[in-house]
Image (tube, rainbow, N blue to C red):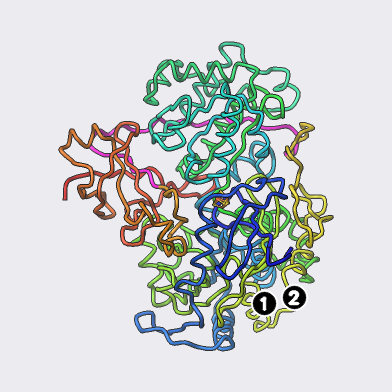
């Protein structure tokens, strides 16, 4: 919607998904919250306000090409670029192709990629950076409730008696959600905020109770709480009998160690753990929020399920007693999953392993039966190995920077430099990954293109353009359609995002994420309503929610090494390709750092600001020290800084259920430089 130079759009800088209103005037762009939007109610943070000033910085304006990755790029025309791309796809068997997409693409773009890759090219060798972010949460939601999709709403914050934030720092990563939590606390000071996190974050600073558990002991804690609730007769047996399955096995698997011993092994005080038991045993409305602290772990699915078990066991899946609400990291990870961009998925929360699901999509896309492959493609970390082994020879990366975000940077770099790989990167700036490519395709950016996104609470809104992009850049939609047409595929002749959305939305009819009745023009809609499964009819085969026994493995203690937790900073977004261009957002965040316990630093004779070296078998990095408060023997470093890519020290260790990488638990030693 555009009136008097005001455009209603949305923010692309986190999963909160704030709705914005952008006024264009002679001084530039004035970004405000869109008060008409029921999801985020007019609130916003500093990122989009500042970012609008730097949209034109360092933009790519022409396709760039080189056949040899060691030689300089040459500018080529769009016709040449899309022809080259199509030729490389045609020349290779489909097993040698791979595509890596992004939770920052708009839903229409991800839908088109899905249709092209899984439908017309007949390969499921496609993944998205959601694999690094939400894959564990997706699998856990499917295991517990039968489908992907967070079950609650931001509105559940507004009447919560207690908010437990486990493995998340919304003060930095989801600022508007955090402000809503603080507003609740201000209006009702009796509301308890409890933070479970090895780091004493800004969120923890504002909490009533910080539970600084040791990294990796989450499942031990959740099992201990479940067992203790059971021992005290505090589980909601009426709800459990009525609406769930698997409780007996789950609780019995959690009972093998005493409460006190479990709590001690997590590095916690009995009093703190008691507070959690008492809270869950009460009738209070508890909202459970979590994000990457649970997700980016080698046992991430178990962590998710362990937290969910506590809510199931105490009958907390409703407006009265509360519920678990997973926070989404990226702005459109939800939308990407809905349109089927992960290696196992198809549009409308369908699955490539399901013959009926494949047949629906094949018929809808006018493809012969059995065109869609029946097995999931390989996930991104396996694709890096396959590139190194010359099995994948073509990689098309869109709107993401895997060189800095995948684990083991040197391994990724070596694979991307493989001369036998044709690497295509589609982005609005020359990212670190793009700088290794054969072919770079300049795209339009936020504020210049049209489409929709779904936020953390399943709310879909339109993102409208409020400026034109640089001459020479194209929309992702145009690029995908041009390549598809050059490949000779029909069904890629759209006039704008609306036509693509309308095609996609029909595939959601009757599905959990049904949006088939929504009009694109006024798209502003929370699919599933405020609360999924409000009728206790779950998407599982038996229509009951599922408990799952949690395999808990207390972390090995090793006093000679530190646990290195990685994460984002407050003002920067991911690998800083855009927010790093804005002076206001760089303030106090210009340089990377290593956060460590003040007492531990002083005991080692390290002073604040002093550069130290952290090392493991993968390499070494030098970072200046900042003192803070963390669980003993833990460090934190931000992941976005290209000069000190922290994932250099993060080995590839994936969750077995979801293939999501553990990015927050590398072991390192530390010494003065
Ligand atoms: Fe954007 Fe997230 Fe800030 Fe909202 S909270 S304005 S979505 S960065």
- The numbered mark at residue 481 is 1
The 10 Å Cα crowd at callout 1, few under 14, some 14 to 19, many 20 or more, is many
Q: Position of residue 518 (x, y in %)?
A: 81, 56
Front in this rendered view, residue 639 or 369: 639
105 sits to left or right of 504? left
**Between 367 and 364, which is closer to the camera in this rendering?**
364
Q: In the image, 303: left or right of 282?
A: left
The image position of residue 544, as x and y in percent, is: 73, 32
Q: Earlier in the sequence, mark 2 or mark 1?
A: 1
Rendered position, 414 above or below 437: above
Q: Is residue 123 above or below residue 65?
A: above
Q: In front here: 362 or 285?
A: 285
Indicate the quadrant where residue 575 lies. Answer: bottom left
> Magenta segment range?
540-566
View extreme (top): residue: 232
**Residue behind mark 2:** 494
Q: Position of residue 354 (x, y in %)?
A: 72, 53
Mark 1 CB within 8 Å of ligand 1: no
* Mark linked to residue 653: none
Q: Quadrant of residue 561?
A: top left
Residue 29, quarter of picture? bottom right
- Sort mark 2 into few (<14), some (14-19) or many (20+) by Cα contacts within 10 Å: few
Residue 594 horizontal/vertical position (percent): 30, 46
In space, the residues marked 2 and 1 are separated at their CA atoms by 8 Å
- The answer to whether residue 561 is magenta is yes
- Relative to 554, 353 lies left or right: right
Q: Residue furthest front?
A: 26
């Amino acid at each position: 919607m555009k009136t008097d130079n005001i455009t209603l759009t949305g923010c692309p800088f986190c999963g909160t998904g704030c709705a914005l209103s952008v006024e264009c005037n002679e001084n530039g762009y004035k970004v405000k919250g869109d008060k008409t939007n029921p999801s985020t109610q007019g609130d916003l943070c500093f990122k989009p306000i500042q970012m609008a000033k730097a949209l034109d910085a360092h933009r790519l304006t022409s396709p760039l090409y080189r056949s040899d990755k060691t030689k300089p790029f040459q500018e080529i025309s769009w016709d040449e670029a899309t022809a080259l791309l199509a030729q490389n796809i045609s020349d290779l068997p489909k097993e040698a192709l791979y595509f890596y997409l992004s939770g920052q693409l708009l839903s229409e773009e991800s839908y088109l990629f899905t249709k092209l890759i899984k439908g017309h090219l007949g390969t499921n060798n496609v993944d998205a950076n959601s694999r690094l972010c939400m894959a564990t949460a997706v699998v856990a939601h499917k295991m517990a409730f039968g489908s992907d999709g967070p079950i609650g709403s931001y509105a559940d914050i507004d009447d919560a008696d207690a908010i437990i934030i486990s493995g998340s720092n919304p003060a930095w990563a989801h600022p508007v959600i955090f402000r809503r939590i603080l507003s609740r606390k201000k209006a009702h000071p009796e509301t308890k905020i409890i933070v479970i996190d090895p780091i004493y974050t800004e969120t923890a600073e504002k909490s009533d109770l910080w539970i600084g558990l040791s990294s990796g002991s989450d499942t031990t804690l959740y099992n201990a709480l479940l067992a203790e609730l059971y021992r005290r007769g505090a589980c909601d047996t009426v709800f459990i009998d009525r609406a769930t399955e698997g409780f007996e096995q789950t609780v019995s698997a959690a009972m093998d160690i005493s409460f006190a011993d479990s709590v001690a092994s997590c590095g916690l005080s009995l009093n703190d753990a008691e507070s959690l038991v008492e809270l869950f045993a009460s009738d209070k409305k508890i909202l459970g929020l979590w994000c990457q602290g649970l997700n980016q772990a080698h046992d991430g699915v178990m962590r998710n399920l362990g937290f969910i078990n506590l809510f199931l066991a105490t009958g907390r899946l409703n407006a009265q007693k509360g519920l678990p609400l997973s926070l989404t990291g990226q702005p459109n990870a939800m939308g990407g999953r809905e349109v089927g961009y992960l290696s196992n998925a198809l549009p409308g929360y369908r699955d490539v392993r399901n013959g009926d699901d494949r047949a629906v999509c094949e018929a809808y896309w006018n493809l012969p039966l059995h065109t869609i492959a029946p097995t999931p493609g390989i996930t991104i970390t396996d694709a890096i190995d396959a590139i190194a082994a010359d099995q994948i020879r073509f990689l098309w990366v869109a709107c993401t920077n895997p060189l800095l975000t995948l684990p083991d940077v040197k391994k990724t770099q070596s694979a991307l430099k493989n001369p036998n790989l044709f690497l295509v990167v589609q982005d609005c700036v020359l990212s670190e990954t793009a700088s290794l490519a054969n072919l770079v395709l300049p795209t339009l950016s936020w504020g210049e293109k049209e489409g929709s996104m779904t936020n953390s609470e399943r709310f879909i809104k339109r993102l409208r353009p409020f400026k034109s992009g640089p001459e020479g850049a194209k929309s992702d939609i145009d690029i995908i359609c041009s390549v598809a047409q050059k490949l000779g595929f029909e069904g890629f002749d759209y006039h704008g995002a609306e036509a693509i959305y309308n095609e996609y939305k029909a595939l959601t009819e009757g599905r959990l994420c049904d949006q088939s009745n929504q009009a694109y023009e006024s798209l502003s809609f929370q699919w599933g309503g405020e609360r999924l499964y409000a009728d206790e009819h779950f998407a599982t085969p038996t229509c009951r929610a599922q408990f799952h026994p949690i395999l808990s493995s207390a972390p090995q203690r090793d006093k000679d090494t530190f646990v290195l937790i990685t994460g984002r900073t407050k003002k920067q977004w991911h690998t800083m390709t855009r927010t790093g261009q804005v002076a206001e957002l760089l303030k106090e965040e210009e340089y990377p750092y290593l956060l460590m316990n003040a007492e531990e630093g002083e005991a080692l004779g390290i002073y604040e600001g002093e550069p130290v070296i952290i090392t493991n078998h993968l390499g070494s990095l030098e970072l200046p020290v900042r003192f803070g408060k963390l669980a003993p023997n833990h460090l934190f470093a931000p992941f976005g800084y290209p000069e000190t890519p922290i994932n250099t020290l993060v080995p590839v260790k994936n969750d077995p259920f979801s293939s999501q990488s553990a990015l927050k638990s590398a072991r390192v030693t530390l010494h003065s430089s």
